[in-house]
Amino acid sequence: MSPQPHLLPLAAAISVALALPAAVLANIDDADSAEMDRILVTADPLGDRGPDDLVRPVSVIVGDELERRRAANLGEVLDGLPGVSNSDFGPGVGRPTVRGLQGARVQVLEDGMGVSDVSREGADHAIGLDVTRAEQIEVFRGPATLLYGSGAAGGVVNVVSGRFSPVVPESFRMDGRFSYGFNGNDRQGRFGADVPLNPDVVLRGDYSIRRTDNFDIKGFQVLGSTQGTEGELLASAIESDSAALSTVFRGDWGHFALGVSYLDYQYDIPKLFDPRPRELGGLSDHFDQINMESLRFDLRGEWLNPVRGLSAARLKMSHTQFEMDEAERFFTRTPEGGVFDRTVVEAEFDNTEFDTRLELVHDPIGNWRGVLGLQFTDRDFESNDPRGADRGFYVRPNETETLAAFLVEERPTGFGRVELGARIERVRSSADDVFGYRVTGVTQADGSFLSFPERLDNRSFTPFSLSAGAVFDVGAEYHARTVLTRSERAPSPEQLYAFGRHPSAGTFEIGDPDLSKEVYTNFELGFDRHAGAHQWEVTAFFNRVNDFIFLASEDDGTGNPVGVNDIGNRAGEGATIGCEPGDGGLCRLRNQLVFNEQANAEFYGVEFSSISQIATGRIPLDFRVSGDYVRGKLRSGGGNLPRITPMRLGVGFDTAFGDDWDLSVDFQRVFRQTSTAETESETGSFNLVGFDLFWTPVLFRNAQLFLQGRNLLNEDGRRHQSFFKEDAPIIGRSFTTGLRFQYGG
């Protein structure tokens, strides 16, 4: 069987990455490679392993690479990593997609504990996290339910801030980063400080701010449209403020830390917005805006050798109060462009979450060392529409409690290391009764009527996960890795309880309270060269999923998804009877009707990356190649799953000029995605070109000036993995300049 044509570029790139001409590398002495400080993966419960020691594929972004990737949201920071892409909903929202999975299947952590927000309840909801605080970001690609439960069926992203580090500086230390982006008048700033009160106590604090206007794009924002303001992404402004304070106490016994953090984030949902009279070209007199606030308290402690047989005991606790409003901002139409009239809040969210985790690292038993863990999470979610009790929200109030125990064991062998693990959870979900809801039900594809359920029974699940893997040492420079994971995931509350309009997302979502667990069987095989002037890594995976839950749309007969009004009526039924084109109110079929369905599915793909030291000396040169391919489809009938990241290939160069200048240049090709689900449109290919230039002044070695360029070709790119791809493209050509510094310590 001949290879598929669209995979040939990927195969060629892997070949180049793994077999650069010997003549290029012949003059490079491996011993000349700078020995980097060992990087520890803090989300690994054993606590002393680096990415090269783990069986699971882990990407760690730290140091200069993190500085080059600095961006406004987590999805944008991680976009382009092998296996990881950005699923945006305008510039205010960027969520990571890992191997084709996103949302409730990718667990986002802050310093090892889950981020509590409502980003699982809608693609338009931002992650409740200040990514500018990150000192290190760890990405576990593939199922990580063993460590962090059902929400990690697709992967884990851990943002490490350093706030709870037991390292106390010798003196006062401060750092900061200030930048200006010419696209969107993007002003950002961050300042942090460490204040040692004595050799064993440190007080840490930081504050960050961001303000933008609307961003520039290539062409018109709606795909194929000629309406709106050309070159501008309307309703895309952002405002954010974030602050944190923590204190750490340390001693020979270990360390203990307390912290509090606050995030105030406001962003617009891009929309064709023009409040001029319609005869002058006006399109709409309102747009959606989201305001969210998060207040989080953390307690962390680690005790060394607490009792006989234990080398360490770690306790992590967090309590988060998260609130969010979805509002419509209305303007009075005027020829000059409208006058602000009023803001109408159409949805309010309140999410309270308590999370506690205990990890007990035992002394070696025979040749086995490992960790036993316990975790408890209590999540209380409420939502309503303040315009009237009968309006409600598409996900009813609910509470979810999760109690889990896990065990991870590692043993060295003559060929390398083996790792075994298991996790069992008890997930209990209960939903409030809802009476007097204005939505009575919806008509299904087969013509039957699905009534809105006023009462729902409690649901309980017992997900169980097992994992076995090994690392094989192949000489001094190579590793082979293999891991087999069987993991289970409980349905999320929105998948169980959704029934109604989700305004900002433009959908009318129907959950299924009878959904069963998803069961993942994931096999991975990897090979890497981790030493020398030419380093690379290749991983292939196959993920077979039973009872995979996905949002399915219905074809209206013209290739487009079925639309319903705000109470679920299709064209010609209920309030839509007698409606004429252009009628407002409940005549508008502005919501895409989607159902949470289950079917057997499979995901498979390949990821690779390499870096080659081409030259050393005064002007060194490194050459990078990376790429990935993922395929997601239903096993029965072979239908495609929606929003699967297209194939990507990238190359880059890193160089320096003396000790003062550092330059990186990157090119990425995002290929066309033609493997689409029912009613899903294809997306075209586009190219991304960017650079990062850093200058460290001779007289100020602790400061650095930078200039960064993104989307230099000013492409009108559409991210296929985004729910919003047809309504807004990627940001156009942008340049950002700024200063970062660090003093003291």
Image (tube, grey):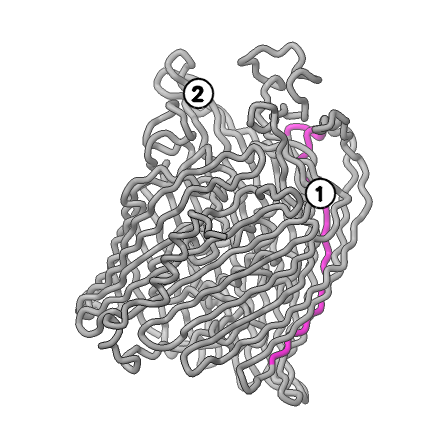
Residue 505 magenta-highlighted: no
Which tag is nearer the camera, tag 1 or tag 2? 2
Relative to residue 247, is residue 149 drawn left or right? right
Place of residue 92 in the rendered image (x, y in percent of width and height, measured from the top left)? 45, 43
Q: Position of residue 107 (x, y in %)?
A: 58, 57
**Residue 609 circle label:** none
Residue drawn at 58 percent across, 43 percent down = 641
**Which one is in front, 85 or 160?**
85
Q: Who's the residue at 42% across and 83% down the image?
A: 476
Q: Is residue 329 visible?
A: yes
Q: In this orientation, which residue lies closer to the viewer: 289 or 553? A: 553
Farthest residue in the front direction?
1
Q: Secondary structure at mark 2?
A: loop
What is the three-letter code of the residue carrying label 2?
Leu
**Which label number is shown at residue 397?**
1
Q: Secondary structure at mark 1?
A: loop
Q: Is residue 160 in view from this perspective?
A: no
Q: Quadrant of residue 142?
A: bottom right
Residue 348 x %, y %: 61, 38
Q: Is residue 720 left or right of residue 702?
A: right
Crowd tier of the residue under label 1, counting other residues whose Cα lies within 10 Å: few below 14, some 14–19, many 20 or above: many
Q: Which residues are magenta?
A: 387-410
- Which residue is under mark 2? 283
